[in-house]
Amino acid sequence: MRIIRQNTKAVQPQTQVQVGQKVSYIYTANEGGSLSRINASTNKLIDTIKIDGSAHNVQVSPDGKIIGATIAASMEGKSSHGSMNINDLAAFYDAQTGKLINQVEVGEHPAHIVFTNDGKYALVTNNGSNSVSVIDITTFKVKGTIPTGKGPHGFRISKNNKYAYIANMGQDTVSVLDIANMKETKKIKVGKTPVTTAISNDGKTLLVTINAGDSLAVVDVESGNVQKIPVGDGPAQVYLQGNDKFAFVANQGTEEKPSNTVSKIDLSTKKVVATIETGKGSHGVVISSDDKHVYVTNMFENTVSVIDNDQNKVIATVNVDKTPNGITFVK
């Protein structure tokens, strides 16, 4: 198995953390080959965990103890020794120390990783294999693989752990997966190039970013009816506030014509109530556990924007490693 190369000394810590001190962190997955860890109290970079490959997405486990990350094998690793090539990985780290716990081979070009809300499993979308790997966290082994639509990417899991809603970028649909029975139950047509999803606490409303349509699709899960809300250029990720009042959409644009905004949407009125300027290539988005701050990765500036949720403005910018994508908040 290919070993992830770690080097937490690659970036000198800017914020010292006392042993045993409980700290909230923001982790980013950087396609340049690392994870960045930020102190959420000071908005300062703590360290950078170097890896052998390209990190795309990260998520914290429900108990706050584990960070899951998707790692695509480097081109060098894929091309060497022919038949000795190895599949891509899901890697798991200690959320407080950043140390590697385990790694699991998954399908081709893993995209997003999400834990079930009971913490028993981690699901990984395999963008190149058109499937989802279901990993048992007690054993760190793949329990099964579920076929999806073409190009599965971002997703979320319902609060009751029954369903996963997978955005199929290559098929303009969302696959609804029955997790317990390890099968797809249906596909919902949503619009061109869906990137990721969010699901309301009651499981009745599904949100999907429609990258090619510059919109957020609001889907009635039971009926399948779709309503579109215009947002910025090339929306990437969406994140729901804890009480489902607001949704935040990171508008990435393209590398040639990057966007630099986040759309804040009131879900009761289905209207954009604020457009917040961030950095170039806004991609990943997450909200602090108290809903006070929104964190956004800016792909083309190698930064994270920290947004005050009440003031609707950026209050800090943190430099991270190259091409940050996914982001997660550790309470």
Image (spheres, rainbow, N blue to C red):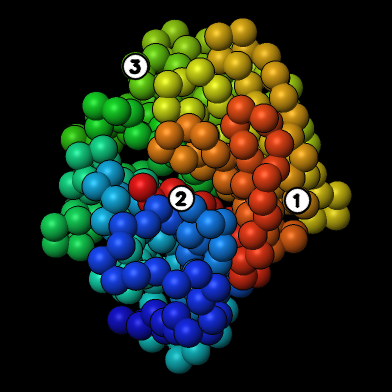
Residue 324 coordinates in the image, percent (x, y)? 61, 60
Q: Earlier in the sequence, mark 1 or mark 3?
A: 3
Decide if residue 179 is on the left or right side of residue 203.
left
Residue 79 coordinates in the image, percent (x, y)? 53, 84
Decide if residue 65 is on the left or right side of residue 208.
left
Residue type pointed to by label 2 = Thr
Give the structural element (helix, strand or loop) at label 3: loop
Q: Residue most toward the left?
A: 138
Residue type pointed to by label 3 = Asp
| Residue hosting label 1 | 279
Q: Nearer the viewer, residue 282 or 53?
A: 282
| Residue hosting label 3 | 202
Of tags 3 and 2, the one toward the viewer is 2
Residue in the image at 29% along x and 28% along y: 159
Q: Residues within 10 Å of mark 2 (few under 14, many from 20)?
A: many
Residue 83 coordinates in the image, percent (x, y)? 40, 85
Q: Residue most toward the bottom?
A: 81
| Residue hosting label 2 | 328
Q: Residues within 10 Å of mark 1 (few under 14, many from 20)?
A: many
- Is residue 220 visible in the rendered image? The answer is yes
Q: Residues within 10 Å of mark 3 (few under 14, many from 20)?
A: few
Residue 88 coordinates in the image, percent (x, y)? 41, 69
Q: Nearer the viewer, residue 270 or 294?
A: 294
Decide if residue 158 is on the left or right side of residue 129.
left
Residue type pointed to by label 1 = Gly
What's the mark number on residue 135? Answer: none
Q: Quadrant of residue 69?
A: bottom left
Q: Quadrant of residue 31?
A: bottom right
Give the structural element (helix, strand or loop) at label 1: loop
Give the structural element (helix, strand or loop) at label 2: strand
Residue in the image at 57% along x and 45% along y: 295
